[in-house]
Amino acid sequence: MVEKARRSLVESDERGNPTPQWEVFVRAEAADPMRHVGSVAAASATEAHEHASRLFGWDAADVWLCPAEAVERYSTRGLATDTEDEESRVSEGADGKPEVQDA
Amino acid sequence: MISISKLLCDLDAEGDGLRYDAAEGSKKPQITEKKQRRPVVVWNTTRRCNLYCSHCYAGADLDPASGEFTTAEGKAFLDQLADYGAPVVLFSGGEPLVRDDLVELVSYAADQGLRPVLSSNGTLITREKAAALRDAGLQYAGISVDGLPERNDRFRGEEGAFDAAVRGIENCLEVGLKTGLRYTITEANAPDLEGVVDLLAEKGLDRFCFYHLDYGGRGAEIVDADLSPQEKREAVRRVADMTLEYHDRGEEIETLLVGNYADAAFLVEYAREEFGEAKAQAVYDYLERNGGDPTGERIADVDYQGNVHLTQFWQGYSLGNVRDRPFGEIWEDESNPLLEALRNREEHLKGKCADCQYQSICRGASRLRALAATGDLFEPDPQCYLTDDEVFGTEAGSMVGGAAD
Ligand code: SF4
C-alpha cells in the first residue's frame, strides 16, 4: 500500500496585512525549473516585480508574482494545532488519491 | 552587536583575544563552527503598539492587526525554535506587552530551553508585570528611549512617554530583572546621547545599546533624518569616549553598537589611536571571531503573521512563513539564491567593500541600506563612514596580512 502525506490546510487569512504580499517564483535560466523564493511586500504587481528583480536579478528568465492570499496551502508541518496526533502519514484512500485533511 | 566596553575596557591588549571565545563555551576557539551557529530569533509577537514612533521598522499601529498568532500557535512556533536549537528568542513588536498572554509565552519559551528576552517601550511595565516576567524566566529587558524627555516624547508620538519608560526601567531594576537601554541614533536625538546615559546611569542602569537606523519599515521614510556618515562617525566616537570616561571613574557601564558594522572597523582605528597597535590587533582579532554583520545568519526575524525575515529591519522581503514550514527548514534552505548569496556575500560585495581591509570584521555592513539607497544588494553601505585611507589600508598600521589570514 502506498503511503501518502497527511497535509492540513494552512490558514492564510490576511497574509497581505498591512502591505500586500506577493509570492515570488523565479526561473533563473531558460532551462531551469521555476522556483519559489519567498515573498515581497508591494502595493502593486509592477512594484512587486521591481522589488523581486532587485533581489533576484534583472536577468532572470522568468519572474512570476502571485498575491499571497490567493495561494491555498496544504502542509504536513505547519503551526496547526488541531492535528497533533503524532502520525504524520496515512494510507492513501481507496480511490488512490491522497487523503488531505482540512485543519 | 558590538560591545564597545568589552573591546576597549576589558580586552587584554596583549593580543590573545582567543580566550574570550573560550570563555563562552569550550576551551578552544570555535572558528570552524561559525557557519553552523543558530540565529537569535526576533519575534514580532504583535503589530499593535500603544505608541506611534516615527522610526518604527515594524510599521506598528494602534489598531489590532489580524493574522497574529493565537497563544497555541505561539507555543507551536516556540516549539519550532526549540527543535531547531535557536539559543535566544527576543519578544518584540509592536509592543509585546499589549499581548495579554506575554507572560505565558515567555514562561513557555523558558521551559523549552530558549532564552527569552524582551524589547519594549517600557511604558506598560508595572512593577507587578516586571515581577511576573522575571518569574516566568525572562532574562533581559531592553527598553527604548530615544532622547531626553522633550525629544523622546515627540519621537514617540506621546507626551509623558519618557517618564513612563523610565518608570518601566525602574520597575525592572527593582525586581532584579537585567535591563538595558535601546537608543536609536538619529539626527534629531544625537545631541542627547550623553544626557540620557547620565540620567539613566544615575538610576542604576548599566547597559546601553545604540542602534543605527536601518532603512526598512517607517525608517525608510526618515532616511533624511539619519545622520550623515561623518556625523555618525562623531556620534560613535562620543559613545566610545563616554565609555572610557565612565570606566576611568570606576563605573563599569556596558555600551553596545547595533546596526552598522563599519563601527567595528572604526573601533580598531579608535583603539590604535588611544592605546596603540597591540590593542588595535586584539580588538581586530576579537571582532574577526565575532563575524561581522549577522543578517541572514546569526539574526532572524519572524513577524506577527509568521513571515521569516533576514533581520528585524528587513520587513519588505520574507523567506517563507512558519505556518507553511517550520522555521528551521526555511532558515536552512539555501536553495533560496538570496539567502545563499548573503551567506557568501564576500564573493559578491562591490566597490570599496570588495577591497576593504576590514571586510572580514564588517562584511559590507547593512545590505538592506545598500539596497534601499542604490537598488543593488551588493553596493557599499551608504552609511559606511570610513575614509579611503582606512578602507584600503594605505596608512601605517594596516591590518592586512597581519591579522586577516
Ligand atoms: S568599506 Fe564596506 S566592508 Fe569596509 S568598513 Fe565600509 S562598509 Fe564595511
Image (cartoon, coloured by chain):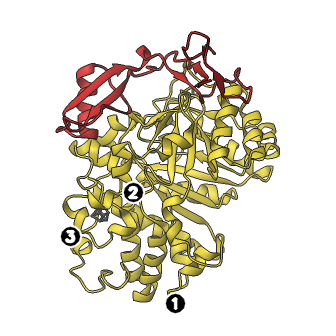
Chain colours: A red, B yellow
Q: Are marks 2 and 1 on the same chain?
A: yes
Q: Residue at x 55, y 84 (%)?
A: B12
As measured in the structure, the alpha-carbon distance from the residue carrying label 1 to the one carrying label 3 is 28 Å
Among the two numbered marks 2 and 1 on one chain, the one whose residue lies closer to the N terminus: 1
Q: Which residue is mark 2?
A: B260
- Tag 3, which chain? B
Mark 2 residue's CB less than 8 Å from ligand 1: no
**Ligand 1 visible in quadrant:** bottom left
Q: Are marks 1 and 3 on the same chain?
A: yes
- Tag 2, which chain? B
Are the residues tagged 2 and 3 within 8 Å (C-beta)? no
Query: What's under tag 3, amino acid-wise?
Result: Asp
Q: Residue furthest front?
A: A1
Front residue of B394/B291: it is B291
Q: Quadrant of the C terminus of chain B?
A: bottom left
User: Can residue B120 be seen from the camera position used here?
Assistant: no
Residue B351 in the image, given as x and y percentages of width and height: 19, 60
Residue B381, compared with residue A28, is above or below; it is below
Query: What's under tag 2, amino acid-wise?
Result: Asn
Residue A58 in the image, given as x and y percentages of width and height: 18, 37
Give the structural element (helix, strand or loop) at label 3.
Answer: helix
User: Can residue A59 be seen from the camera position used here?
Assistant: yes
Are the residues tagged 2 and 1 within 8 Å (C-beta)? no
Give the structural element (helix, strand or loop) at label 2.
Answer: loop
Q: Residue at x 44, y 44 (%)?
A: B310
Q: Which residue is mark 3?
A: B388
